[in-house]
Image: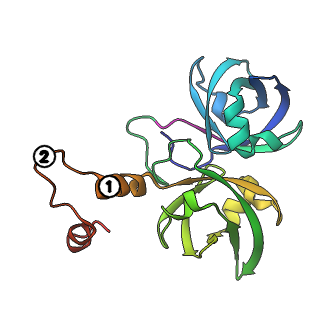
Protein backbone atom coordinates (compact mmCIF):
# COMPACT_ATOMS: atom_id res chain seq x y z
CA UNK A 1 0.00 0.00 0.00
CA UNK A 2 1.00 3.60 -0.63
CA UNK A 3 -0.36 6.98 0.45
CA UNK A 4 -0.10 8.98 -2.76
CA UNK A 5 2.37 11.44 -1.23
CA UNK A 6 5.30 11.58 -3.65
CA UNK A 7 8.70 11.45 -1.94
CA UNK A 8 10.81 12.56 -4.87
CA UNK A 9 11.12 12.59 -8.63
CA UNK A 10 13.57 10.07 -10.05
CA UNK A 11 15.24 10.01 -13.45
CA UNK A 12 15.01 7.08 -15.87
CA UNK A 13 18.51 5.81 -16.64
CA UNK A 14 17.62 2.86 -18.85
CA UNK A 15 14.58 0.95 -20.03
CA UNK A 16 15.57 -2.41 -21.47
CA UNK A 17 12.66 -3.92 -23.36
CA UNK A 18 12.15 -7.64 -23.86
CA UNK A 19 9.44 -9.70 -25.51
CA UNK A 20 7.84 -10.83 -22.25
CA UNK A 21 9.36 -8.48 -19.68
CA UNK A 22 11.40 -5.31 -19.40
CA UNK A 23 13.77 -3.80 -16.86
CA UNK A 24 13.82 -0.18 -15.76
CA UNK A 25 16.63 1.54 -13.86
CA UNK A 26 15.97 4.82 -12.08
CA UNK A 27 18.32 7.31 -10.47
CA UNK A 28 16.99 8.28 -7.06
CA UNK A 29 17.99 9.58 -3.65
CA UNK A 30 15.43 9.58 -0.84
CA UNK A 31 13.74 6.27 -1.68
CA UNK A 32 17.15 4.56 -1.50
CA UNK A 33 17.78 5.55 2.13
CA UNK A 34 16.58 2.23 3.58
CA UNK A 35 15.87 0.20 0.46
CA UNK A 36 16.16 -3.60 0.46
CA UNK A 37 15.83 -6.21 -2.26
CA UNK A 38 12.19 -7.07 -2.71
CA UNK A 39 10.90 -3.70 -1.48
CA UNK A 40 7.97 -2.11 -3.29
CA UNK A 41 8.35 1.31 -4.88
CA UNK A 42 5.60 3.04 -6.84
CA UNK A 43 6.80 4.53 -10.13
CA UNK A 44 4.20 6.92 -11.52
CA UNK A 45 1.71 5.05 -9.37
CA UNK A 46 2.72 1.57 -10.55
CA UNK A 47 3.87 -0.78 -7.78
CA UNK A 48 7.15 -2.45 -8.78
CA UNK A 49 9.61 -4.64 -6.90
CA UNK A 50 13.23 -3.63 -6.40
CA UNK A 51 15.48 -6.28 -7.98
CA UNK A 52 18.83 -4.51 -7.56
CA UNK A 53 20.17 -1.22 -6.24
CA UNK A 54 23.21 0.78 -5.24
CA UNK A 55 23.72 4.22 -3.69
CA UNK A 56 22.49 6.10 -6.75
CA UNK A 57 19.85 4.01 -8.48
CA UNK A 58 17.57 0.98 -8.35
CA UNK A 59 16.18 -1.43 -10.93
CA UNK A 60 12.84 -3.20 -11.26
CA UNK A 61 11.32 -5.70 -13.67
CA UNK A 62 8.07 -5.06 -15.54
CA UNK A 63 5.88 -7.64 -17.21
CA UNK A 64 4.54 -6.98 -20.71
CA UNK A 65 1.05 -6.43 -19.28
CA UNK A 66 2.36 -3.63 -17.04
CA UNK A 67 3.76 -1.78 -20.02
CA UNK A 68 0.61 -2.39 -22.05
CA UNK A 69 -1.75 -1.03 -19.39
CA UNK A 70 0.24 1.93 -18.01
CA UNK A 71 2.11 4.97 -19.30
CA UNK A 72 5.43 3.42 -18.28
CA UNK A 73 5.62 2.16 -21.86
CA UNK A 74 6.22 5.77 -22.96
CA UNK A 75 9.24 6.37 -20.73
CA UNK A 76 12.68 7.04 -22.13
CA UNK A 77 16.13 7.81 -20.79
CA UNK A 78 16.29 11.06 -18.85
CA UNK A 79 12.58 11.36 -18.15
CA UNK A 80 11.31 12.18 -14.67
CA UNK A 81 9.03 9.86 -12.70
CA UNK A 82 7.18 10.11 -9.39
CA UNK A 83 8.52 7.83 -6.66
CA UNK A 84 7.05 6.63 -3.37
CA UNK A 85 8.10 3.81 -1.07
CA UNK A 86 5.44 1.48 0.32
CA UNK A 87 3.84 2.80 3.50
CA UNK A 88 4.83 1.34 6.85
CA UNK A 89 2.53 0.64 9.79
CA UNK A 90 2.40 3.82 11.83
CA UNK A 91 3.15 6.20 8.94
CA UNK A 92 0.97 9.27 8.59
CA UNK A 93 -1.82 8.84 6.04
CA UNK A 94 -1.28 12.17 4.30
CA UNK A 95 -3.13 11.14 1.15
CA UNK A 96 -5.36 8.07 0.79
CA UNK A 97 -4.90 4.32 0.42
CA UNK A 98 -3.27 3.66 -2.95
CA UNK A 99 -2.59 0.09 -4.08
CA UNK A 100 -0.27 0.81 -6.97
CA UNK A 101 -2.58 -1.08 -9.34
CA UNK A 102 -3.47 1.18 -12.26
CA UNK A 103 -7.12 1.04 -13.37
CA UNK A 104 -6.63 2.89 -16.63
CA UNK A 105 -4.64 5.48 -18.54
CA UNK A 106 -6.06 8.97 -18.95
CA UNK A 107 -5.11 11.92 -21.15
CA UNK A 108 -4.55 15.46 -19.94
CA UNK A 109 -6.78 17.59 -22.17
CA UNK A 110 -6.77 21.01 -20.50
CA UNK A 111 -4.83 23.03 -17.93
CA UNK A 112 -6.38 26.19 -16.49
CA UNK A 113 -4.69 28.56 -14.05
CA UNK A 114 -7.11 29.68 -11.34
CA UNK A 115 -5.49 32.05 -8.85
CA UNK A 116 -2.43 30.12 -7.58
CA UNK A 117 -3.78 26.70 -8.55
CA UNK A 118 -3.84 24.72 -11.76
CA UNK A 119 -7.04 22.92 -12.67
CA UNK A 120 -6.37 19.84 -14.78
CA UNK A 121 -9.05 18.21 -16.91
CA UNK A 122 -8.31 14.58 -17.65
CA UNK A 123 -10.12 12.37 -20.12
CA UNK A 124 -10.60 9.06 -18.36
CA UNK A 125 -11.88 5.60 -19.33
CA UNK A 126 -15.24 4.30 -18.02
CA UNK A 127 -13.54 1.77 -15.73
CA UNK A 128 -12.11 4.70 -13.76
CA UNK A 129 -15.01 7.14 -13.95
CA UNK A 130 -17.53 4.66 -12.56
CA UNK A 131 -15.65 4.71 -9.24
CA UNK A 132 -15.01 8.47 -9.24
CA UNK A 133 -17.03 11.05 -7.29
CA UNK A 134 -16.62 14.78 -6.72
CA UNK A 135 -14.64 15.47 -3.53
CA UNK A 136 -13.47 11.86 -3.54
CA UNK A 137 -9.88 10.71 -3.97
CA UNK A 138 -8.01 9.54 -7.04
CA UNK A 139 -4.35 8.70 -7.70
CA UNK A 140 -2.92 10.36 -10.82
CA UNK A 141 0.58 9.12 -11.70
CA UNK A 142 0.73 8.01 -8.06
CA UNK A 143 -0.28 11.40 -6.63
CA UNK A 144 -3.20 11.46 -4.19
CA UNK A 145 -5.57 14.20 -5.35
CA UNK A 146 -9.11 15.33 -4.60
CA UNK A 147 -11.56 15.19 -7.48
CA UNK A 148 -13.13 18.59 -8.21
CA UNK A 149 -15.79 17.44 -10.64
CA UNK A 150 -16.78 14.44 -12.76
CA UNK A 151 -18.15 14.54 -16.31
CA UNK A 152 -19.36 11.79 -18.68
CA UNK A 153 -15.88 11.31 -20.17
CA UNK A 154 -13.52 13.22 -17.90
CA UNK A 155 -12.71 14.53 -14.44
CA UNK A 156 -11.00 17.60 -13.01
CA UNK A 157 -8.50 18.00 -10.20
CA UNK A 158 -6.70 21.03 -8.79
CA UNK A 159 -3.04 21.15 -7.83
CA UNK A 160 -1.28 23.75 -5.72
CA UNK A 161 2.16 25.20 -6.60
CA UNK A 162 3.93 22.80 -4.21
CA UNK A 163 2.46 19.75 -5.96
CA UNK A 164 3.40 21.20 -9.33
CA UNK A 165 6.95 21.78 -8.13
CA UNK A 166 7.63 18.33 -6.65
CA UNK A 167 5.79 16.02 -9.09
CA UNK A 168 5.66 15.38 -12.81
CA UNK A 169 2.23 17.03 -13.08
CA UNK A 170 4.01 20.37 -12.88
CA UNK A 171 5.38 20.10 -16.41
CA UNK A 172 2.86 17.86 -18.19
CA UNK A 173 1.11 19.46 -21.15
CA UNK A 174 -2.22 18.68 -22.84
CA UNK A 175 -1.92 15.40 -24.70
CA UNK A 176 0.24 13.78 -22.02
CA UNK A 177 -0.94 10.49 -20.56
CA UNK A 178 -1.38 9.76 -16.86
CA UNK A 179 -1.90 6.60 -14.84
CA UNK A 180 -5.20 6.56 -12.97
CA UNK A 181 -6.17 4.52 -9.91
CA UNK A 182 -9.64 4.95 -8.47
CA UNK A 183 -10.27 4.94 -4.73
CA UNK A 184 -10.49 1.34 -3.54
CA UNK A 185 -13.55 2.20 -1.43
CA UNK A 186 -15.60 2.43 -4.62
CA UNK A 187 -14.70 -1.14 -5.51
CA UNK A 188 -15.85 -2.43 -2.12
CA UNK A 189 -19.16 -0.59 -2.42
CA UNK A 190 -19.68 -2.08 -5.89
CA UNK A 191 -18.90 -5.54 -4.57
CA UNK A 192 -21.38 -5.15 -1.71
CA UNK A 193 -24.11 -3.98 -4.06
CA UNK A 194 -23.55 -6.91 -6.42
CA UNK A 195 -23.18 -9.55 -3.72
CA UNK A 196 -26.03 -12.03 -3.44
CA UNK A 197 -26.43 -14.37 -0.49
CA UNK A 198 -26.62 -17.98 -1.74
CA UNK A 199 -29.68 -18.92 0.32
CA UNK A 200 -30.91 -16.46 2.89
CA UNK A 201 -30.70 -13.34 0.70
CA UNK A 202 -29.37 -9.97 1.83
CA UNK A 203 -30.95 -6.76 3.07
CA UNK A 204 -28.03 -4.79 1.67
CA UNK A 205 -29.07 -2.40 -1.10
CA UNK A 206 -28.20 0.99 -2.53
CA UNK A 207 -31.05 2.46 -0.48
CA UNK A 208 -29.73 0.86 2.72
CA UNK A 209 -26.20 2.19 2.12
CA UNK A 210 -27.51 5.70 1.40
CA UNK A 211 -29.75 5.74 4.48
CA UNK A 212 -26.83 4.76 6.69
CA UNK A 213 -24.34 7.23 5.26
CA UNK A 214 -22.14 4.83 3.27
CA UNK A 215 -22.81 6.46 -0.10
Label 1, secondary structure: give it. helix
> What residue lies at 61% left-to-right and 33% top-to-bottom?
41
> What residue lies at 80% left-to-right and 60% top-to-bottom?
172
> What residue lies at 69% left-to-right and 72% top-to-bottom?
121
Residue carrying label 1: 194
Q: In which quarter of the image is residue 48?
A: top right
The magenta region covers 83-87
Near-viewer residue (168 or 148): 148
Dominant secondary structure of the magenta stretch?
A: strand
Looking at the image, residue 22 lies above or below residue 123:
above
Q: Closer to the observer: label 2 or label 1?
A: 2
Looking at the image, residue 94 lies above or below residue 11:
below
Q: Does the magenta stretch include residue 134?
A: no
The x, y position of residue 78, in whole percent, is 89, 39
The x, y position of residue 189, in whole percent, is 34, 57
Horizontal relation, residue 53 to residue 45: left or right: right
Residue carrying label 2: 199
Near-viewer residue (103 or 37): 103
Residue 42 visible within the image: yes
> What residue lies at 55% left-to-right and 64% top-to-bottom?
129
The x, y position of residue 104, in whole percent, is 63, 51
* Mark earlier in primary sequence (2, 1): 1
Horizontal relation, residue 62 to residue 209: left or right: right
The x, y position of residue 149, in whole percent, is 56, 76
Q: Distance between the residues labelled 2 and 1?
A: 15 Å
Looking at the image, residue 127 lies above or below residue 84:
below
Residue 56 visible within the image: no
Q: How crowded is mark 2: few (under 14 residues within 10 Å), some or many (20 or more)?
A: few
The extreme front residue here reads: 199
Amino acid sequence: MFTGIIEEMGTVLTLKRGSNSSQISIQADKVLEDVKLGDSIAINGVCLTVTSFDRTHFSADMMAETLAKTNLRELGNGQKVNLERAARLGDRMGGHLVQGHVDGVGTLVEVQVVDIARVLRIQAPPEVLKYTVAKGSIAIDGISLTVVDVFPDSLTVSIIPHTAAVTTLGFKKPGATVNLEADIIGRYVERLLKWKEPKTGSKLSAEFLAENGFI
